[in-house]
Amino acid sequence: MKTKLYGIGVGPGDPEYLTLKAKRIMNSVDVLICPSKSEDAESFAYEIVKPNMENKDVEVLKMIFPMHYKTHDLKKKWAENGKVISDLLSQGKTCGFITLGDPTVYSTFIYTLPYIDDAVMDLELIPGITSFCAVASEIKQPLMVWEESLKVMPVRKNSKDHLIQAVGEHDNLVLMKPSSDTQAIVEAIRHHGLENNFMLISKVGTEGSHMIRDIEVLENTKLPYLSTMIIKKGGFRD
Amino acid sequence: MKTKLYGIGVGPGDPEYLTLKAKRIMNSVDVLICPSKSEDAESFAYEIVKPNMENKDVEVLKMIFPMHYKTHDLKKKWAENGKVISDLLSQGKTCGFITLGDPTVYSTFIYTLPYIDDAVMDLELIPGITSFCAVASEIKQPLMVWEESLKVMPVRKNSKDHLIQAVGEHDNLVLMKPSSDTQAIVEAIRHHGLENNFMLISKVGTEGSHMIRDIEVLENTKLPYLSTMIIKKGGFRD
């Protein structure tokens, strides 16, 4: 028999960016799975939903998803986690897996899904606010208008040439994980003379939220992992 | 003195995709501005929020934003609407402007903003669930994983060559407003042999929601305006 597994997007940080559906479902499941990067760390996804956890019967289960593992160990850990979730589902327990942002956008949940036994899983995904939409709202700028398009891409290590090309090609560009190679981003922006056409926000929607729009500040800042940059070739509105 | 104007994203259709913040703010303003395409039509954005309108003191103001006007008339109408909003703000009334999806993604609100007097406006944007995130959740597919990127673009009229290029270039492509030139999309998909690599959903999150993943059905269907297509070169997960 299949039991329900929900992949629940909780948005990028502000507890109020939770959807009504996410709030309802997370308070209705038997087990709420909360990814965390280590034993010692709080689950950031759980911190986001905590103010809206009203049902004390929900079992809150912290699950470790290391971020900087060697690939082999990471896959082993995912397989272990997938087994735990499959077992819970086999026991007839409905499970919610909370995940930062939206479950279909580079989410921990999507990476875990292949390790969960299809035979015991009736899957439902609940969309969430993406970091890039939250950042655009925070800076009061459109992501795209009229006939414009938007490109969203992750920054890789050693990606200078790739970034120079991408910054040149797209009217509106969102860079995820800019901490992977901040120097390459700085060089790509300078290459195209777009020093006044970027904004970056770290930890959007949280008390630690921080904006950078000065290229020299960007160059000299060690960015947090949860940072998002928007580059608009046409510039920002006043 | 400046009064607060909120641009409130209400998501693509499901009332439960409203955020907690959107719900709180729309119940706290003096006037809730609800865009509608004609005098006769209901405001779709208002239909989405209606189940969560709890404060009867909020004045609900339908505002007409015609979709198929000649450009000149459209701008004239926007200017008129902007004047109405500026006047409300000048009177010290806080206003919420509800808009489909997210306010920074091709939204009616963003197009109206230049016509509102900055001198009377203290602006705040509240992000919403985008149609493409809702569609990806509905079809239980990732928009992007790992090093992949995502391109989001609107379909224009007579855009066959443009679409053939875009479909060829991007791993993950979201086409907004596919009703603008469905035949060109069909040809671009066939050109690249990607007949099994697209899914389209119309009116996601509503009772009229409808999925198409057969190229011949796509070719012979007159799509609603509110349709979104995802094309994944690497294919969909089982």
Image (cartoon, coloured by chain):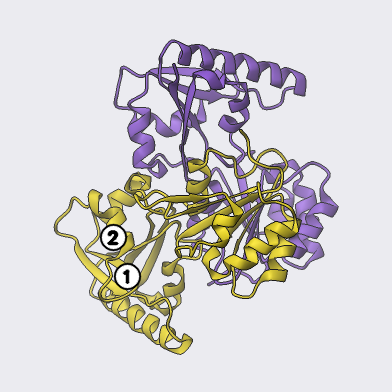
Chain colours: A yellow, B purple
Q: What residue did someone put label 1 on?
A: A36
Q: Nearer the viewer, residue B227 or B144?
A: B144
Q: Hey, what amino acid is under mark 1?
A: Ser
Label pair 2/1, CB-CB below 8 angstroms: yes
**Quarter holding the N terminus of chain A?**
bottom left
Q: Quadrant of residue A30?
A: bottom left
Please determine whether, in this image, residue A102 is positioned above or below residue B117. Answer: below
Residue plotted at (29% across, 23% down): B55
Circle on res. A46: 2
The outermost residue toward the bottom is A72
Circle on res. B31: none
Q: Position of residue B12 (x, y in %)?
A: 51, 42
Please determine whether, in this image, residue A38 is positioned above or below residue B42. Answer: below
Mark 1 lies on a secondary structure that is: strand
Q: Would residue A114 be seen by someone viewing this image from the given angle?
A: yes
Q: Nearer the viewer, residue A51 or B19?
A: A51
Please determine whether, in this image, residue A111 is positioned above or below residue B3. Answer: below
Mark 2 lies on a secondary structure that is: helix
Q: Position of residue A151 (x, y in %)?
A: 65, 56
Residue plotted at (36% across, 50% down): A206
**Quarter holding the C terminus of chain A?**
top right
Q: Hey, what amino acid is under mark 2?
A: Tyr
Q: Is residue B132 left or right of residue A195?
A: left
Disc 1: host chain: A
Disc 2: host chain: A
Disc 2 from disc 1: Cα separation: 9 Å
Q: Would residue B195 be seen by someone viewing this image from the given angle?
A: no
Let me know if marks 2 and 1 both belong to one chain: yes
Q: How many marks?
A: 2
